[in-house]
Image: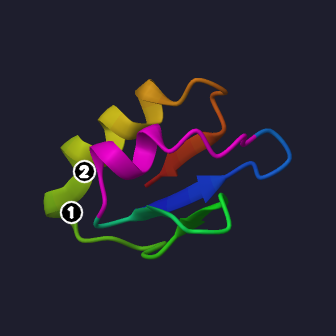
Amino acid sequence: MKVIVDYENCDSHGVCASVCPEVFELRDDDFMYVINENPDESLRPKIELAVKSCPKQALKLEG
């Protein structure tokens, strides 16, 4: 699976980072970063929740 972020739409609210810190990180510069674009399958439930929770719908999961 692969995590896709639409950075044009992302406002770095940090919801994804709070739901799944293994994949997403909100840094001191107030920007969201994907720290693991191809995460382990065991993280799928948390990533799916992060995708659904994104207030700007800027996240997508492929695969």
Q: In the figure, is residue 51 to the left or right of 46?
A: right
Residue 60: horizontal and vertical position, in percent? 56, 43
**Picture residue at 66% right of the left edge, 38% below the top:** 58
> Relative to 5, is 14 on the left or the right?
left
* Colour logic: rainbow
Quadrant in which the C terminus is drawn: bottom left
The image quarter in which residue 40 lies: bottom left
Q: Which residue is mark 2?
A: 44
Question: Which class describes the residues within 10 Å of circle 1: few (<14), some (14-19), or many (20+)?
Answer: few
Residue 29 is marked as none
Q: Secondary structure at mark 2?
A: helix
Percent of width and height locating residue 1: 40, 62
Which range of residues does the magenta coloring cover?
10-21
Looking at the rendered structure, the secondary structure element under dot 1 is helix
Question: Which label sits on residue 41?
Answer: 1
48 vs 32, left or right, is left
Q: CA distance from mark 2 to mark 1?
A: 5 Å
Magenta-colored stretch includes residue 17: yes
